[in-house]
Amino acid sequence: MFFSGKKFNNWGRNIHINPKKISPKTHTELKKIINNKNFIVHGNQRSYGDACLNKNMMISMSNFDQIRYFNKKSGIIEIESGMLLKDLLPIIIKEGWFVPVTPGTKYVSFGGMVANNVHGKNIQKNHIGHFIKEITLLNLKKKILKCSKKKNKKIFTLTIGGFGLTGIILTVKLQLKKISSFYLHQKITEFNTFKEFYSISKKVSNYNYSVSWIDSFSHNKFRGLNYLSKHSNTKKEEDFFFNDRKIDPISLFISRLIVKNYFLLRIFNFIYRNYKKHFYNKLSDINEIFYPQDYFTNWNRSYSKEGFFQIQFVIPENKFKKILTEISYFFKKTRTFSTFVVVKKFSERGRYLNYSGTGYSISFDFKIDNKFKAIKLFFNELTKKYNLRVNFSKDLIINKSSALNYPEFKLFKKEISLLNRKKKINSFLSERLGI
């Protein structure tokens, strides 16, 4: 068992702590750790928010990173929770399979994907939970449980999107997606108004994935690019691999200028939008379609020492323009801007605090500066006013008062307390929301 006392921060680099960090190697060592009070389990620490942070003790599952079972004909695979998506992809792609739902980075653990019930760019079935067959869980009674829709169903449902509060996820059994190639056909379309955006977002029936990058918006303008893609049958004789590239000093300097200066950001967006709409690769690989932000593995350093945060929520289609107009007025009034705005058509059901709803999922990235409190207050009031569903797995700012609006918040808290007695497992998120 490895112990570390190094300083620690989340991916947003906005919370800095110095917990005891433990990296157990066996189930026996994990069971000993359960005797401790006040800990959280984590994977690769790619969470934007505070869902996998604990100032007392953090348990890394990095040593549990093996494939337990893989049926290459059916695509059923069982993976240890500490395995990273980037390590699995080359193995399964070679055999003609892909993960059915992937987040925007491949540097995540499968335990983290389950605990946050991650979503991606899927036009349909956009939760990893749709494809989970079974979870092996070590509970606080030191028992190893097999959980599925047929066995220990309640624990199974609570664990998917349960933020790691139900126990320690050991393995995940998953149904993979059959593919013929690691290439996809891509189509990029520009839009300049809400009407154009609505029209484009409805013409997706021939594609598997959709996402829109927003350049700018106001009460009468909504400008950006829509990306559509679908798996291709095109095969090329080359190996599929990932390059782990750190951001170089020049790129870091330029990116820090852009995220700090609104006018430089506008210039960059203008150049990027016009380049992309004319000179994009119609046949692109999985890396380019799903993981463009992974071009630099440590792109989060582009922000200041105070870091950045993201907020993501679902807006019903009939309120989309109204709410976006309200946000644009706030930006103008406070001279605030988001460095990155992404929109996805979204329609997902989900229990408890799972990220769900019907309409458009939108996310904003903000550097943390002297406007942080104003932004935090505004979005708490906005989400509460319109009863918007927030993605808590990325969240840093929503308070308990806003969370109480969720129909199943109290039920989630009650059922978690039955599994997590005395709140042995807890995080900054669970403390903030009073779970």
Image (spheres, rainbow, N blue to C red):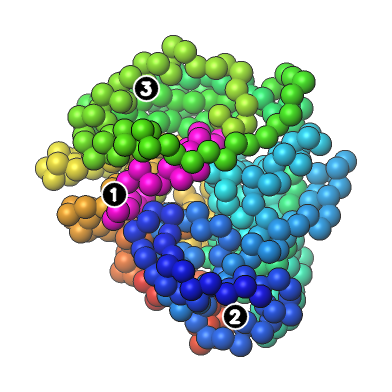
Q: Nearer the viewer, mark 3 or mark 1?
A: 1
Q: Is residue 343 left or right of residue 62?
A: left
Number of other residues with Cα within 10 Å of mark 3, as a class: few under 14, some 14 to 19, many 20 or more: few
Residue type at mark 2: give it. Answer: Leu
Relative to 83, 40 lies left or right: left
Task: Give the mark nearest the N terminus, 1 or 2.
Answer: 1
Amino acid type at circle 1 is Ser
Q: Which type of secondary structure does the marked residue at label 2 adopt?
A: helix
Residue 291 picture location, percent across and down: 54, 37
Residue 124 to residue 137: above or below: above
Tag 1 residue:
304
Relative vertical location of residue 199 with respect to residue 88 in this rendering, above or below? above
For the point 47% across and 56% down, the residue is 47
Q: Which residues are magenta?
A: 290-310
- What is the distance, in whole Å, between disc 2 and disc 3 at their CAs? 49 Å
Q: Earlier in the sequence, mark 3 or mark 1?
A: 3
Give whichever of 249, 340 is nearer the camera.
249
Q: Residues within 10 Å of mark 1 (few under 14, many from 20)?
A: some
